[in-house]
Structures are given as C-alpha cells and as structure tokens.
Image (cartoon, coloured by chain):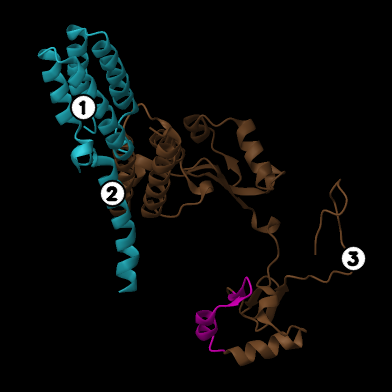
Amino acid sequence: MKKKLLYLFPVMLLLLFVILMLGGPFIKKPISETDDVIKYLMLTQKDIQNNNWKPAEKNSKKLSTAWKKVQSRIQFSSERDEMNGINVSIARLRGFIAAKEAGGALAEIYEIQEHWFDLGQ
Amino acid sequence: MNEGLIVVVRGIIGFFSLLIFARILGKQQISQLTFFDYILGITIGSIAASLTTDLSSRAWPHWVGLFTWTLACLGFQIVTLKWRKASKYIDGEATIVIMNGKIMEEAMRTLRYRAEDLLEQLRIQGAFDISQVEFAVVEKNGQLSVLKKSQYQPITPSDMNLPTSYAGIGTELIYNGVIIDQNLKNVNLDNNWLAAELKKQGISDPAEVFLAILETSGDLYVDTYKDRLQHITDISDYKNQIKE
C-alpha cells in the first residue's frame, strides 16, 4: 500500500500541474455575474453601435472589473502578451468611449474578443 | 497580473516536474555520463528554466518539451538495455589505446586522441610512467581507465597470503540524534545494547550523537555534536572560524 502511494503521489502531482497549465479555457468561464467578460463586452458593443455612450461607459467599467477578476485566476495558464493585449485594448476602448468614437471603440472590442479566444489556448 | 507570483508557480511546476523526470531516468553519476547524456542534461535544464521564466509563452509547451525529451531519453535507455547492438550504435564502445604496454596509434587516430591527451589522462590516473601501464581504455564517457602492469600494482593482503576478516558496509544506527529503529532491527540489536555502547563512550543520550555507524567488524563508530577536541587545527585566514 505504501509503495502504491509512493508511485501515485508523483503521478497525481504531475496531473495537477497539467490541469493547472491547461485549465485556461475552463477557468476563464464566468463564476458569477461580476466576472462575465464576454457579457459586458457584448453589452458595450451594443451600446456603442446604438450610440448609447453613458451605458457604454458603465459597461466598459464593469468589463474592466470582470477582466481583473478573471485575470487573477487565468494568469498561470495564459501567455502574458495576450493578457497585456486585453489590458491595453480595454484602456483604449474606454478612451474611445470617452471621446465618443464608435469606429475606434468597435475595433478595440473586436481586438479584445480576438485576445479572449486565444487566451489559454 | 503578478509576474513574480506567476514565476513562483511556474518555478514550482518546473522544479518538481524535473525532479520527478530525473528520478524516472534513474541515478547516474556525472562522471559516468557520455557526452550526449551531458548535453541532454543541459537541454532539459534549459527547457525547465524557460518554463519558469519565459512569460511570453505559456508553461504548457515548455512542459511538453521537457516531457518529450525525458520520454525520448527513457526510450533510448530501454532500447539500449534490451538490444546490445543498439547500445553500441548509440552510445559507442570503449576503445583500447594501450594494449600490453603498446600504444594503439590507429585507435587513437580514430578517436582523434592525441599523445598529449593520453599522457595527461594517464597522469590524472596516477600513471606518470607510461612504461608501467599494461592497458589503457578510453571509456564511452571519454574517461581513461588504466590497468598498471602487475609488478607496479599496490600489494594486497592476498599477495602476502595474509588472512583478512570480512569488511562490508556499515549500518547507520543514529543520524542527526535520532535512532534508526529499522536498521537496529536489521542487525538484530536493540535500544538497550545501543544505550550500553554509548555509555561506554561517555554518552548518556542518543540526541548528543550526530552519527553512529555499526561497522562489520562489530565496532561502533560514534560522532557527537560536541567534538571535545584537545587541539583545534585551524587553516583559515580568519580567526575563530571553527566552532565546536
């Protein structure tokens, strides 16, 4: 029994490492309302397309908060460049919303989506 | 994103993965490694280092690289173990460069082994006079093994027809102040015997003992934490470096 445990322990440890490294696509899924990145991204996109700048600003703020929550748990299984890309795009998105520039804002939305889908892949 | 924390986590993953893979590949002393084994070790270490600190890519591809190299190495170990011809093809074989006192120039040329290299390795092996060497073999890992002529080999009790008693491996009975009960049981002794032996040497508590080894001659070697030296030899340039 002891010998079995001695062999089982490193196997379980390696399995844990693999789960940690490959868990990105599952970990980025929302746990609660406040960390649903895609939801706030879509809402923001809709607001921008309808020229509703105040709601767009609110939703972009919620998007930023949601992303911070997801980032803290996905950082171990994702590329730093992808996460930095989303950080930069969200910052630029908020700038475009403040300036009420739909074109730039939508471009940033699509860039965030692109980075999001690559995250953890 | 906390880069420091990510590096710590990836470092732990890399460290323990490397530890497990190294244990799977087995024990091999550095001196016994072939050149390829040495390069393999460096490569695997480099991959583990990248896994830890290269944040521009995910940990997963590096870990897969580490796993692949380990698996390949293990595969080769199994193949060379089961198939002698493969072993010779992959690892090469030992080459005799001095045979019956004569230098094998053709073998040396094949190995690109110069006379200076040969003399250097002979000196490292303690053979300063080449005329005393019967055989010299360049092993797979590049080391030179030397067999001196019989008249230049050290005398042994067997040469003098002297009887000797058995000399085997000692058994650790105390380590770091803790009695190793399993070893005590293996040599059919108990704590009472050990306490009596320690008392003979003026030791009342096993916790005072750093190391106690029972030799095959029956003697108990004991080293205590307090060495009680009469005269301390200090070779350091700085005063009072040796603490009792």
Give the residue type that dot 1 points to: Trp
Q: Earlier in the sequence, mark 2 or mark 3?
A: 2
Q: CA distance from mark 2 to mark 3?
A: 57 Å
Mark whose residue sits in front, 2 or 1 = 1
| Left or right, A75 with reference to B214 | left
Q: Position of residue B142 (x, y in %)?
A: 52, 40
Chain in brown? B
Amino acid type at image mark 3: His
Q: What residue does disc 2 label? A: B79
Res. A72 mark: none
Residue at (63% x, 91% y) in the render: B193
Asked whether the viewer can see residue B171, the reply is yes
Residue assigned mark 3 = B231
Could you tell me which chain the residue with mark 1 belongs to?
A
Q: Are marks 2 and 1 on the same chain?
A: no
The quadrant of the rendering that contains the C terminus of chain B is bottom right
Q: Residue at x 65, y 47 (%)?
A: B125
Q: Is residue A70 above or below residue B174?
A: above
The span picked out in magenta is: B170-189
Residue B61 locus on image (x, y percent): 29, 34
Query: Color of chain A here?
Result: cyan
Name the residue beneath numbered marker 1: A116
